[in-house]
Amino acid sequence: MQVGIDTVSVVLPTAPSHVSRGLSPGACCRAREDAKAFRYQDEVESWNAGDLSFAPFVMEAFGAFGEDAVQICKQIAEAAADSETSGWSRVEAMLACAAATSVAMLKGNAYIVRSCAMYARRAAFVGGPGRPIGAGDARPRARGSGRPPLRRPLAGT
């Protein structure tokens, strides 16, 4: 049976929606796989492609693979091992598939952390989200306060 991947999904087992339902980390992947299979059931039946089936590729944000994702990696490894031009054994291809997807997941996690850190740094520097840089310092002090303005006001203020 050949597997056609129609969807890739990442779950966060520490998300409140998973924790509140009491899902263990492995159960989070299984629940997402079941949800994707149910969602695309009609579309898969309309394919009517004989031995082609649907399997969602689901991973956890911390790196664990769903059952269908493991099966997909095994099929990729078998195809690579059967190919005369790949030069890879089945084990090497399986490890390469796992390593490549794990690295992609780590890159995505790093991007999220970096984006959050940049947003937090920007918010701390400008005095809050949505405020222009220097907004707190742009207004001159009130006349008659006895203190000189901090600096000239920005244009339009």
Image (spheres, helix red, strand yellow):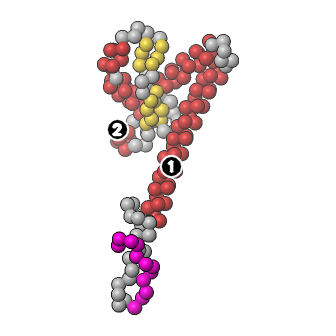
The correct choice, above or below, for 20 with respect to 74 in the image is below
- Label 2 crowd (10 A; few <14 / some 14-19 / many >=20): few
Q: Quadrant of residue 54?
A: top left
Q: Number of marks in the image?
A: 2
What main secondary structure does the magenta stretch of the protein show?
A: loop
Res. 27 visible in picture: no
Q: Residue furthest top?
A: 50
Residue 94 in percent (x, y) is at: 60, 23
Q: Which residue is mark 1?
A: 113
Give, as a three-letter code, the residue at label 1: Val
Q: Please indicate whether residue 88 sits to the left or right of residue 118 in the image.
A: right
The answer to whether residue 17 is above or below residue 151 is above
Is 90 above or below relative to 115? above
Residue 51 in the image, given as x and y percentages of width and height: 43, 9
Residue displayed at 52% across by 24% down: 70
Label 2: element kind? loop
Residue ID for mark 2: 21
Q: Residue at x 32, y 25 (%)?
A: 39
User: Magenta region: which residues?
Assistant: 146-157
Please identify the quadrant where the C terminus is shown: bottom left
